[in-house]
Image (cartoon, rainbow, N blue to C red):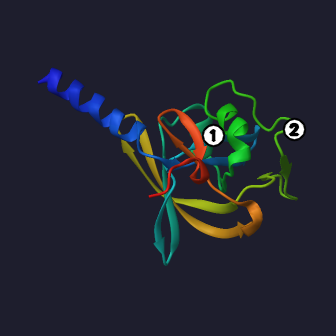
Amino acid sequence: MQESLDALAGDFKAVFREHPAAVTIITALTPEGPVGLTASSVASVAVDPTAISFSVTRATGTAGALLRADELQVHFLAPEHAAVATQFSFTGGERFAPGQGWSFDADGAPRLAGARARLNVRILDTLSVGGSVLVVAQVASLERDAAAGDALLYADRQFFSRGDARAL
């Protein structure tokens, strides 16, 4: 039985490793300062109310700080953000550093220059699933930069853009 569960888990990981997903950075302003992480699990949920979902792998550290925040910002990345996405993807990565393109709103919320879009959201609900937390969040406001260009994508442990992919 355990062997079949291990095989299922391995196959599951392989399928999703090869499944391309758009890359975002989710940020929040906390009493300790700004926090953020890279996420490729953002999906639209509903138009009325306007809502998204995403998952985080645990409710501690940066993910825990995001889950406790009143408001989150979801930055949809362009290909030029690959290095920033990498830094936000692991514990100890350099975050909000000079040269990464960050500024801060009047209320202190992070803003990434050149992001294709920035959603300000509030968490509606969470669901623990194993070691992960599924989050449903309502969009309070949205800023879109139509000139920002292509989306940053991730598959098979690599960043790329649609322009890198072969069109059918």
Q: How would you rate the neighbour count of disc 2 (Cα within 10 Å): few for under 14, some for 14-19, many for 20 or more?
A: few
Structural distance between the alpha carbons of marks 2 and 1: 17 Å
The residue closer to the viewer here, 127 or 50, is 50
Residue at horizontal 51%, vertical 67%?
A: 51
The residue closer to the viewer here, 148 or 86, is 148
Rendered image: mark on residue 51: none
Name which quarter of the figure residue 70 lies in.
bottom right
Residue at horizontal 62%, vertical 35%?
A: 62
Q: Name, please, the residue furthest toward the left.
A: 1
Name which quarter of the figure residue 122 lies in.
bottom right
Residue 135: x, y in percent?
Answer: 48, 52
Q: Amino acid at mark 2?
A: Gly
Which label lies toward us, 2 or 1? Answer: 2
Name which quarter of the figure residue 146 lies in.
bottom right
Residue 50: x, y in percent?
Answer: 53, 72
Q: Amino acid at mark 1?
A: Leu
Sequence-earlier tag: 2 or 1: 1
Residue at horizontal 44%, vertical 58%?
A: 168
Residue assigned mark 1? 37
The residue closer to the viewer here, 6 or 167, is 167
Residue assigned mark 2? 99
Query: 1 above or below 81?
Result: above
Question: Quick one: SS at disc 1?
Answer: strand
Please state if 102 lies on the left or on the right of 156 as rendered: right
Please state if 133 lies on the left or on the right of 61 as rendered: left
Residue 12: x, y in percent?
Answer: 30, 36
Query: 96 above or below 79?
Result: above
Q: Which quadrant is home to the N terminus?
A: top left
Q: How would you rate the neighbour count of disc 1 (Cα within 10 Å): few for under 14, some for 14-19, many for 20 or more?
A: many
Residue 149: x, y in percent?
Answer: 70, 60
Residue at horizontal 38%, vertical 41%?
A: 16
